[in-house]
Image (cartoon, rainbow, N blue to C red):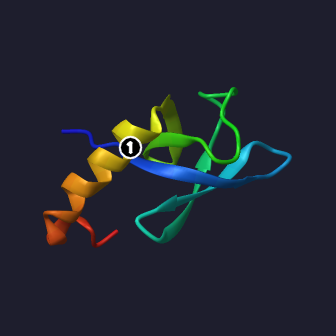
Amino acid sequence: MCLAIPGKVTEISEDRIANVDILGAQRSASLDLVPQAQVGDYVLVHAGFAIEVVDPQFAEETLDLIKDFPELCEI
């Protein structure tokens, strides 16, 4: 099973590597698959790649569900 987790893009480097905040943890993710992503957008992150820009409400609802299962928050 594959799992992609929403995170908020906090900065983007010149080589299109984003710093993404996922439940307070900072991760790097390539934006090669979502060139339209900008700082402030929520993206789904899987295996080091942002794979889709998602609606902020969807992202927040998904993160709230993840918080209901503390064992999933150990990123």
Q: Residue at x 31, y 54 (%)?
A: 63
Vertical side of 36 occupied by 65: above or below: below
Can you say whether 46 is above or below 26 in the image? above
Q: Is residue 14 or residue 42 the one in the foreground?
A: 42
Q: Which of the 4 image quarters holds residue 75? A: bottom left
Q: Is residue 18 left or right of residue 58?
A: right
Residue name at image x 52 percent, y 43 percent: 42
Residue bearing mark 1: 59
Q: Amino acid at mark 1?
A: Ala
SS class of the residue under badge 1? helix
The quadrant in which the N terminus is found is: top left
Image height of 22 relative to 34, above or below: below
Q: Which one is nearer the viewer's eye here, 55 or 72?
A: 55
Q: Position of residue 53 (x, y in %)?
A: 52, 31
Q: Residue furthest right?
A: 14
Residue at the spot x=28%, y=43% of the render? 3
7 or 45, which lies in front? 7
Q: Position of residue 58 (x, y in %)?
A: 35, 37
> Where is residue 70 shown, x and y percent of the image?
17, 71
Residue 28 % position (x, y) = 60, 57
* Residue plotted at (59% across, 27% down): 33
Foreground residue among 11 and 51? 11
